[in-house]
Every structure is written in C-alpha cells, then in structure tokens.
Amino acid sequence: MKLRLPNWLLALTCVVATGLGSVLLALIGTFYYLKPTLPDVASIRDIKLQVPLRIFSRDGVLIAQIGEQRRIPVRYADLPDRVVQAFLAAEDDRFFEHPGIDWQGVTRAVLFALGMPGPGGGGSTLTQQLVRTTLIQNEPTLRRKAREIFLAVTLEDELSKEEILELYLNTVFLGQRAYGVAAAAEIYFGKALPELSIAEAALLAGIPQRPSSYNPIASRELARGRRAYVLRRMYEQGFISADERRLALAETVSGEVSGPASALNAPYVAEMVRLELLERYGDALYTDGFVAYATVDSRLQWAADVALRSAMLEYDQRHGYRGPLRKTQLSPVETPDELVGLLEEVPAYGGLLPAVVVAVDPRSATVATRQRGVLELPLEQVRWARAALGRDRLGPPIASVAEVLQRGDLVYVLPKGDGRAWLAQLPEAQGAMVALDPVDGAIVALSGGFDYFASQFNRVTQARRQAGSGFKPFIYSAAIDHGFTPSSILLDAPVVYEAPEGADFADWRPENDDSRFYGPIRLRDALARSRNLISIRLMRAMGFAVAREHALRFGFDPEFVAEDLTIALGTAQVTPLEMATGFAAFANGGFGIKPYLVERVLDAEGSLLWEATPMLACATCPKDAGVGDGSAYPRRPEAVTRWSTSIDEVGGNLEPPADQRAPRVISAANAFIVTDMLRDVVRVGTARRALALGRTDLAGKTGTSNDVRDAWFAGFNPELVAVSWVGFDTERSLGAQEQGGRTALPMWIHFMREALRDQPEQRSAMPSGVVTARVSRVTGQPTRWNDPDAVLDYFLEGQLEPSTAADQVTPPATVPRPPSSQDPIF
C-alpha cells in the first residue's frame, strides 16, 4: 500500500524546496558577483601588525613606546586561559564549534538592515570581527555583510581556530590606542598578560563592543557594568566558580593609566632617539616594530632626574612662596566628587601632586590628592614658604601654617611616603643635566628640564647659553701650550681697554665677580678662584685668535664663539652637551669624542639593523696623528668600560681599529696638568661644596654668566663627565646671591653621589711629557726643599721656568668690543 502525502504537505514541501533552492542559487550568485571584490584570505597569514617603536635603556629597561597603535604581539601558546575564556564568554562562546558564522546573528542583522523592527547588529563571530578589522572596511551595508560572511567561512578553511584567535586577540581595539590584549593589559593595569586576574581579564573582554566608552579610563562605571556581564557569562559557561565570580566582582576598577610595567621615565631621551631614527627610517619607525637601545643607564638616568628636580626645588624655595595656584570656596563638608573635580584640572609635574587644602591649624594642614589620598603638611615642611617680595626679598619667617595656607587653596605638594608631604610649587627656573662616558661619548644620563610634559624644550641640546667661567679651562689649556705653567705669576689688578678715537663704544673695564683684586697670583690659584682679569691677561698675552683656535678643538661651534677678548669671560654660547663634550677631553687624556645616544636598532624579529661605532679615546694606542706626543693616561682595563661596553665589543682588544680611534685635541700632558688645576677648584676653590662627596678624584669648574643669568658646573673624574645648568628660559637674573657653586653645583653633587656610589676612586697616572718641580707659592719660581712657601707643581717637560712677563706684551691689534648686559663676569 503506497503512502500518499496530503496535497497541502506536498505543496509545502515544494515551496520549501523551491525556497531553499532559490536561497542556494542566490548565495551562489552573490558569491560569484562579489568574488572579484574579495581579498585573498591567505594574505591574512602575512598581515603586518602595526607595532610601535620601543626604546630601551642600555640595561634593558623600557623607556617608551612610540606609535599610533600600542601593540605587543603575543603567540597563542602564551595566551593565559582566563583571557581566552573571558573573550569567548563575552563575544563568541561557540567559537570552537561553528564554521565561522552564527546564522541567527546574520538573520537578525539582515532583517535590521532591511528596515525590520527588532534589535540590530550583534551575532558577529570572532572570525567575522577579525575579517572586519583586517580584510574589509567596517560599513553597515548588506554588501559588506555578505562579503564578511563569505570571507569568514573561507578563513575558517584557511586557518586553524587557534590561529584565528591569536590574530583576533592581537588586533582587537581595546581603547586608549591599545590594540591587542597584551598592550591593553599594560595600559590599564601595568601588568603582563600572565599576571592578570580573572576580574582584569573580564574587564578587557568587555571593552570591544564599545572601546571608547567601556574602557575604565573613559568610564569606571560602564567598565564595571560590562565586567559584571562578562563574569556572569564566564560563570554560565563553567569557566569560573561562584566564589571566583564573587571575588572578581569585588575588585576595584581603577580609572588611571598604568602604562608599561617597569618603565624608565626619560621622555627627553625618548624624543631624541625618535628624531634620530625618524631621519633614518621615516614613518615606518612607528609601525614596523623597531626596537632601539639607548646608551643611557637606568640607574644614572633616575639619578639625573632626581638631582635636577631636587636642585630646582631647593633653588625655588630660597626665593620664596608665590602663593597657591588658585583659591576656591569649598562646601562646608567637602565631597569626594567636589575634590576630584578641582584636582582633575591640574596636572602633576615632576613628582609634584596637585592638592586641595581641606583643613588648617597652626601646626599643620591637611590636603587631599587624587594619587595619594589625604596627606599632612607639618609646619616644618611649610616654613620655607616666606612670601616672595621680588628683588631677592622675602617676607617675615613663618610661625604658623595658617599664615601660608587656607582651606580651599589649590597647591602642589611633594609626598614624603609616610603620610606627610612638603608644600611645593612648580619652579619658574629650569635646569639641565647630562653625563657622558669620556671614553666613547656615550650619553649615560640626560634630563632636559624639570618635567617634559610641562615643557618639551630640551635644554641639554637646545639651550645655547653663555658659559661664563666654565669656559676658562679651555683658555688655560691654550696657555699651557703657549709657555705658561700652573705656577706662572700674573697680576690680578684693574685693566682698562681704551676705545679708539671716534669709536661708538666706551672704554672697556672688565672686573672680577667680587670686585676684589689679589695682585700677583699663580695661574693655578687664579683658576681655582675664577679671576676674570687673569683670563683676560692670558688671552691678551697669547692673542685671542690663538686662544680661540685652541678652544674650538674641543668641539664648540665657531659661530657662537666670539672673535675678541671677551671669550676670556665666557661669552661663548654653548649647550650643556657641548660643555660635557669639551670637558671629556680633560677626563680621557686629550681625545675629542663625539656624544651619541642610540647604541643599536633591531627589527621586529630581533635582527640587528644598525649599531653605533663610536670613536674611542684609546688609552694604549701608539702615537697617533694630531696634537701632542700620542701618549694617553694608563687606565685599568676593567675601568675603561664602566658605563659603556664599546671597547669590549671591539673584541676584547683595548686598541680599536685605526678608523675608530678618536683624534687628539690636546696632549696627554696638557690634559693632565689642566685636570690637576681643576682639582684645586674642588679642593680649595669655588666648588668646595663637592668635597661633601668624600672623594679626591674629582675635578671641575663653576660658571656664572653676567647678571647671574646662567649657573653652571662641569665636573668629572676619569670615568664620568657630568654637566649641570640652571637658568630661566626667558633670560633674567637668578638672584644676586646665586652662582655656579651655589645653584648648579648641588645638582651635580646629587647626581654624582649616586653615580659614583660604591665606585673606587680613579686617579690617572702622570703621563710622559710632565715633570714635577718645587716652586715658591709666592714667586712661582723654583726654590729649595726647605723653603716654607715651597709647593710641588706640574710642568710640561722643558718649561720649568715659569713666565712672569705675561703682562708686558704688545696689545692685540683688534680692540675688543665693549661689554654688554650679556657678558659673563664669573
């Protein structure tokens, strides 16, 4: 007996079959119609992820990531289970089961696009999202949706599920310029992926739906709500237990940017590296995953930043309190939202935190900060804040905190770490600190200002200021090469240079800083006491052209070194980096090195693209072309590369190839004698404060320009050269009581205390070409051993007779220009 289907069922079957056939034919037709516009899915294997430039210190500490997209590629095998589970629960719980398409979601999206009522969007699998972000443009049209579907199915045939998930988790946008889960983990939590908690993984998984809104920096409340949704889905999928879900829900959501873990804060260094590499590699620098290693040492860089900020705050406190940033009227009982609203308007700079004064009594004040909560300001940390009255005048001493602060004041504070803080203010003056390895010129520390985000002007390389007496060692070096000795006697007395008849300037009467005159004085003592008139007489005796040519050997730009006698007073306009380069020649035995900052560059795969080949001050090389006899300081091999590794990298040979040897600029004998004279500057001269370091291997020179517009100290030992500078960006006086030894030297001391910590003293042996003799400190002439005024001094071989007639020479043909308000006097 044949089974006969009812007519209505036959008709329904025909309709369904016809419909399915039509749909199939439509899909086939659509596929062939769109096929010419579909990209090759195989190309996704070779997709080039935009990876930012990463800059590291020499010892491997991350300094910066620079690029439009912050991304850290990670392999699937390195993805923590909790991260994978969180994204599957939030976005695609059937990812490992479906063929790339969720048909229910597709139907919903199609109906919505046709104008049918109901929820739109949604339903996209992780595969579709990957296609949308890598292969096609994201536009809400049926054509784009159809292309997305075909590509998703094809992609599932081309790649494994693990490969698709790896690509997705490396490309998904998670707000705040973070692409991929690893970069987002650093930005939001300051952690590497394996360190994320369940709550943190769930928070990241909740962001992709609306990255600009659901990230915790944009909105902690929305981020907390999305995290709760993801945790519920993880619990429903069996990925976490009820207890794990409860604990995760209780975790606090922070709205602060955490940044990369273990980062070294050196933005001036990062910008210098970026500019150098941009010139070499162009815009590919920001996307191709380059890794650059800078020459800075993380410990020394930290020390430079702390030293600069400490010195600037000390200087600022000496000149009084300028008042609060703003006075506000708080509610009788202030609310957290009220305080946050006030504090959000003021950025933190250089370790200083904005704070609102919420309570004041005579002995202390209570302030509220965003970063550290509530802090106490004891009277002792407020006493410095005498009113700044101008012209170096201060108000009366502070006896009560209430004399300085009132409730509602918006101020800066410097936390101490014990719940207390100092009252502070953002310094108006600026500073610079740079340190070099004198062997190869590697910049081991560089700080271009109090805070990069307050001012991007890099004073180490861009501030060209008058050197003041900091330039004198180069004049004295010329004198040593032209017949003078450390014991030469010159007259410290007034001198007048008369203007020619009809000249449009008056007579020139240079002076000493203190307006005192010592009469006949040894050259060594004149340098230690920074006597201006002795420098002028030296220049006059040698001829300014001879002295200028000698000074230019040290690397100064001739455009900014005057062609007259005023360079004896330091009118040369130099940068702190140029000063450090010049003083390196004294530290390394007479070689002219070139400073450099980028040590090597790697590509995204870790292959070497470029490596620096600096010129080296060779301590053991045979006689070389240039100035002097070719000898250099004997140096301990293990000490040659304390800060850098360049000589070791030549292959363990302390004699680098001839084309990598730095040229001589002065003889080893000249460098030794000038360095010994500069040790007296520290021992008995204007830099006596440096004796606080308890070392005998330090040498250097203070410098103060006219009207105290600039304060300098350039100092060194055989291992390290460092220069500190203080001044206003818009040139004006630092104050009548300020000078290089008081203003800039403390910064140098702060830095060197840390830089030379636990380092043995390094005293260079006397090189060939130098002899010693006993001379009278009064006459500068050789004397007997039992003369009570006898001292040992150094001389160039063949120059045992000190010059005493330096002032009886024919004046130079060129009359120096008259002084101006820019001329340094100390």
Image (cartoon, rainbow, N blue to C red):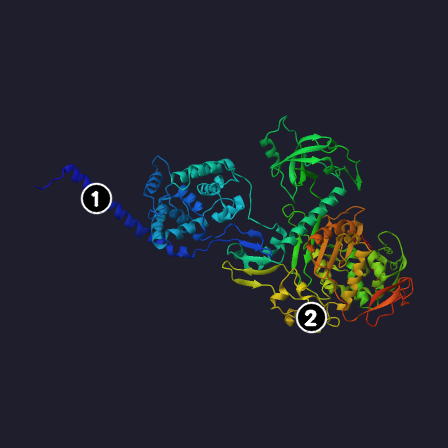
Q: Residue 620's mark? A: 2
Q: Is residue 543 above or below residue 328?
A: below
Q: Is mark 1 on a helix, strand or loop?
A: helix
The quarter of the picture where residue 258 lies is: top right
Where's residue 574, x and y in %?
Answer: 73, 57
The N terminus, quarter of image? top left
The amino acid type, in three-letter code, at marker 1 is Ala
> Disc 1 or 2, which lies upstream in sequence?
1
Where's residue 673, x and y in %?
Answer: 79, 65
Are the residues tagged 1 and 2 within 8 Å (C-beta)? no
Where's residue 332, x and y in %?
Answer: 64, 25
Compare residues 109 and 592 and report the one nearer the observer. 592
Residue, far left: 1
The C terminus, quarter of image? bottom right
The quarter of the picture where residue 118 lies is: top left
Where's residue 522, x and y in %?
Answer: 87, 61
Compare residues 224 and 518 and report the one nearer the observer. 224
The residue at 75%/37% (across/down) is: 383
The amino acid type, in three-letter code, at marker 2 is Thr
In whole angstroms, how far apart are the C-alphas of marks 1 and 2? 93 Å
Q: Residue 17's mark? A: 1
